[in-house]
Amino acid sequence: MGKDRSGRRTEEGYLSSPERSLYGRRYGRPLRQERREALENRLPEMQVEIPQDGFLDLTALFPPSVQKVWLEIGSGNGEHAAWQAEKNPHVGVVAVEPFINGVANLLSIAGRNGLPNIRVLADDVRLLLAKLKPGSIARTFILFPDPWPKRRHWRRRIVNAEVLDQLARAMPGGAELRVGTDHADYLVWMLRVLRSHPDFVWAPACADDWRCRPADWPETRFEAKGWEAGRASTYLSLRRG
């Protein structure tokens, strides 16, 4: 058992309040020293603080060299977010991941590789989405989110109309939304939700557009495990209309 910020006890791995709903584990195995130190020393300067009032100016969180901001929802162990930040130094990457071990790993990578253009939020992404200025996110990634395969858990799926509504407000016309999954049933769900949303357009030119991973979309360990288990991955790229 644990406590949320209001002090109310909750089931382990799940925080719930009128403002947030987090499902799944918050903590895993004890952190190695490097990651523990990264969490203690780097998180205070790299975490995103959600304002109580008004909108959050994301560009103000980054060095002046940052020209635009990308958002990753569910950054896992941080491999993808770190890769994008290193390959695109003019881009600020906001990685949202409630699993503390994953956050610690990303902070450790950022420290080793000297990445000043990463910020993290170890909380419910919906808290952030509600505070973003319109048109402030140039690209969003939702890569291999938890499929929550049991029907009674489908409401927990992060690809839903409510989140897409918030993203549509935060992303300008022409901005890209990248979504990936290796779960067949969740793919059907995603396509139904994404294609029915009026503000996002999916227009693949051929089958390779969703079967082949783009060159600037690095493979993560989670995705590799899926391939090893015989699960094919699907890569969706949509545009904000």
Image: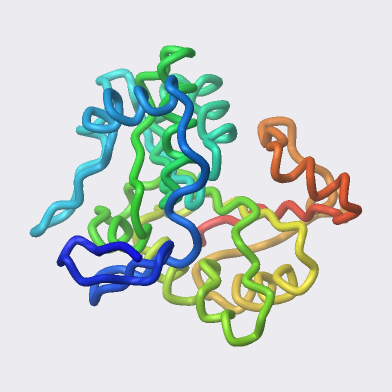
From what the image shows, is residue 230 above or below residue 186? above
Q: Nearer the viewer, residue 175 or 192?
A: 192
Residue 89 image offset from top left, x and y in percent? 45, 19
Quadrant occupied by the N terminus: bottom left
Residue at 31% x, 62% y is 2
Location of residue 55 by image quarter: bottom left
Q: Is residue 115 left or right of residue 50?
A: right
Residue 226 image offset from top left, x and y in percent? 80, 50
Which residue lies most toward the right here? 230
Residue 151 image offset from top left, x and y in percent? 65, 85
From what the image shows, is residue 207 above or below residue 183? above
Residue 147 image offset from top left, x and y in percent? 65, 67
Q: Is residue 37 left or right of residue 50?
A: right
Q: Is residue 161 left or right of residue 127?
A: right
Residue at 80% x, 53% y is 233
Which residue lies most toward the left here? 53
